[in-house]
Amino acid sequence: MTTIKITLTVDQARILRDAIDLMHRLRLGQVEELRDVWDLKEQWGKRQEIEEHALHIKKIVFPELDGLGHSYGVGSDLGKDVSRMYEIYKVLSHALWQTLPNPPSRTVDGDDPYQLRYSGDDKIPFEVNHA
């Protein structure tokens, strides 16, 4: 099997993790997550408009998911790539948790990143180097 190894800064890893998280959520049917792509926290009208358009997209792509907040769950049989996205996200989240000066012990990111695996792929190796 051919593999690729990359080294990322903490900021680069966070950007990659967030991008994978968004793509994973979209593939699960959480199309309304598009409202958070842009920094519109204080612009509720725009956020609502994006959410309304996202619901139209959702009806086209996922007609079986009726309404806001309805989506498939992690581990749903939507293809290996969807499962792989979740597994990569978990590993990156755990690695980022390890970079915190005093990581909280009770957090999802502190859990074993290999706990839930659906793709059938080998575990994704990672290491955190504190320079």
Image (tube, grey):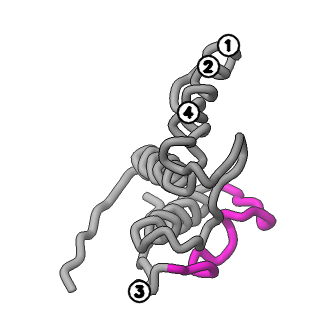
Secondary structure under badge 1? helix
Is residue 16 in sight in this rendering?
yes
The amino acid on which the numbered mark 1 sits, given as a three-letter code, is Gly
Q: Residue at x 47, y 61 (%)?
A: 130
Q: Nearer the viewer, mark 3 or mark 2?
A: 2
Can residue 128 be seen here?
no
The residue indicated by pointer 3 is 122
State how far apart marks 3 and 4 are (Cα): 37 Å
Q: Nearer the viewer, mark 3 or mark 4?
A: 4
Find disc 1 in the rendering and name its residue.
45
**Residue at left offset 55%, top offset 42%:** 58
The tally of labels here is: 4
User: What residue is shown with label 4?
Assistant: 56
Q: Tell me where residue 131 appears, x and y as whole percent.
A: 43, 58
Find out whether residue 14 is within the magenta segment. Answer: no
Identify the magenta region: 101-118
How much space separates mark 3 and mark 1, taking CA atoms? 45 Å
Label 3 to label 2, Cα distance in Å? 42 Å
Q: Position of residue 8 (x, y in %)?
A: 36, 55
What secondary structure is found at the residue carrying circle 2?
A: helix
Disc 1 + disc 2, Cβ < 8 Å: yes
